[in-house]
Each structure stands twice: as C-alpha cells, then as structure tokens.
Amino acid sequence: MIVIMGASGTTGGALLRSLASSGVPSRALSRDPDRLRAHLGDLADGVVEVVRPTPQTQLRYVRLSKGPNSFSSPWPTASTRSSSKRV
C-alpha cells in the first residue's frame, strides 16, 4: 500500500494515476474525496482508497516517514518548516 498525500494536486495526481493504471494498491489523501473519486472514475475501482485526511492522520503519516519506508509529500513537515528560512 502506497499512501499519497496531496493526491488531487498536480504531482500527487499524476503519481496516483500512474500507480492506479499499473494496479498498485494506493491510499489517496484528499481534502475533497468525492471530487477525486469522480476525477479518477473507473481507474480507482478496487485499487485506490480515497480518504479525507485529518490532522491526526497527517501526523501519523509524517511519523511513519521517519522509518525505513519511502515517503514523499508536497506538504511541508515540521522538520522542513523549522529548517527553512523566511525571506
């Protein structure tokens, strides 16, 4: 199972469509699950689970990213926010 945060965005959406068309099971986090399901159509049937993230689920996935698994997120995490400089 691959979790995609920002699945309705440009990068996350492209990744999700690629995975779904290859039959890779994925969980897509989207602020508007109904719109994402409609956009994906039959491509998502049985392969993609679309869910609305909550602050708790976002935190859980960020914690998982600190383990040995691969993780990619278009959203800034606490570690990237604290290390970035404001101009």
Image: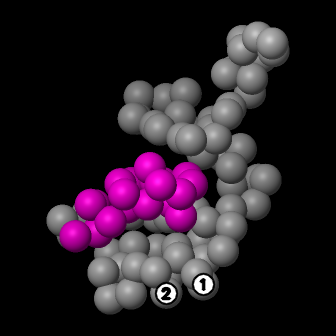
Residue 81 vs residue 59, the one in the foreground: 81
Q: Amino acid at mark 1?
A: Asp
SS for dot 1: helix
Estimate how packed mark 1 is, as few (under 14), some (14 to 19) or many (20 or more) residues with alpha carbons within 10 Å.
few
Residue named by callout 2: 38
Do we see residue 46 in this rendering? Answer: no
Residue in the image at 39% along x and 35% along y: 70
The x, y position of residue 85, in whole percent, is 76, 11
Residue 15 included in the magenta stretch of the image: yes
- Dots 2, 1 in contact, CB < 8 A: yes
Estimate how packed mark 2 is, as few (under 14), some (14 to 19) or many (20 or more) residues with alpha carbons within 10 Å.
few
Q: Which residues are magenta?
A: 1-21
The x, y position of residue 56, in whole percent, is 76, 53
The x, y position of residue 44, in whole percent, is 36, 79
Do we see residue 29 in this rendering? Answer: yes
Residue named by callout 1: 34
Q: Quadrant of residue 33?
A: bottom right
Please state if 59 lies on the left or on the right of 26 as rendered: right
Residue in the image at 40% along x and 35% along y: 69
Residue 81 vs residue 85, the one in the foreground: 85
* Label of residue 71 in the image: none
Q: Quadrant of residue 80?
A: top right
SS for dot 2: helix
Residue 2 included in the magenta stretch of the image: yes
Residue 61 vs residue 5, the one in the foreground: 5
Q: Amino acid at mark 2?
A: Ala
- Seen in the picture, residue 50 relative to 6 is either above or below; the reply is below
Residue in the image at 44% along x and 50% along y: 11
